[in-house]
Image (cartoon, helix red, strand yellow):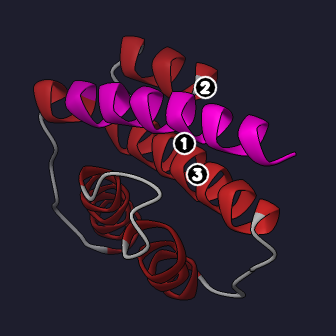
Amino acid sequence: MKAAKLLLEEGMLDDAVNRAYYSFFHAAKAMLNVLGFDAKTHSGLISEFGLRIIKTNLLDKKFAEYFRRAFEMRESSDYEIGVIFGEEEVQTLLKNAEEFLKKAQEFTAKRL
């Protein structure tokens, strides 16, 4: 998250999106790991997160929406030509990532 914030401050929005997404990625992976699950791919991780954490009501479904949106934005910024994200959209992504990380810390602390 620190890198994402610094990149946003420097106007490097695509790079900020990438770093914010990986905050989601690693936090979701940690939550699944404490439950004894893992995934090998990005889409697999999103699916497992939805199945094991959201569908079992361990977290609010908004966190799955945040994670999926972060993935979509990262895919677009990394692989599509001409995709431009506005600063406000990236700020929202970072705000959501911080909320997700806080929830992941609480989630894993309860289960360790």
**Image: 103 above or below 65:** above
Q: Quadrant of residue 40?
A: bottom right
Residue nearest the observer in this picture, 68 or 13: 68
> How many badges with numbers are in the image?
3
Q: In the rendered view of the protein, which quadrant contains the C terminus?
A: top right
Residue nearest the observer in this picture, 40 or 54: 54
Q: Name the spot of residue 105 as percent of width and height, x first.
A: 66, 33
Mark sitting earlier along the chain (2/3): 2
Image marks 2 and 3: residues in contact by CB distance under 8 Å:
no
Task: Please report the bounds of the magenta region as a residue range.
Answer: 91-112
Q: Secondary structure at mark 2?
A: helix
Q: Name the spot of residue 74 as percent of width and height, x first.
A: 38, 60
Main SS, magenta region, reads helix
Which residue matches tag 3?
Answer: 22
- Mark number, residue 19: 1
What's the residue at 74%, 55% (across, down)? 30
Q: Amino acid at mark 2?
A: Ala
Q: Residues within 10 Å of mark 1 (few under 14, many from 20)?
A: many
- Mark number, residue 3: 2
Is 95 included in the stretch rendered in magenta? yes
What's the residue at 54%, 82% (across, down)? 48
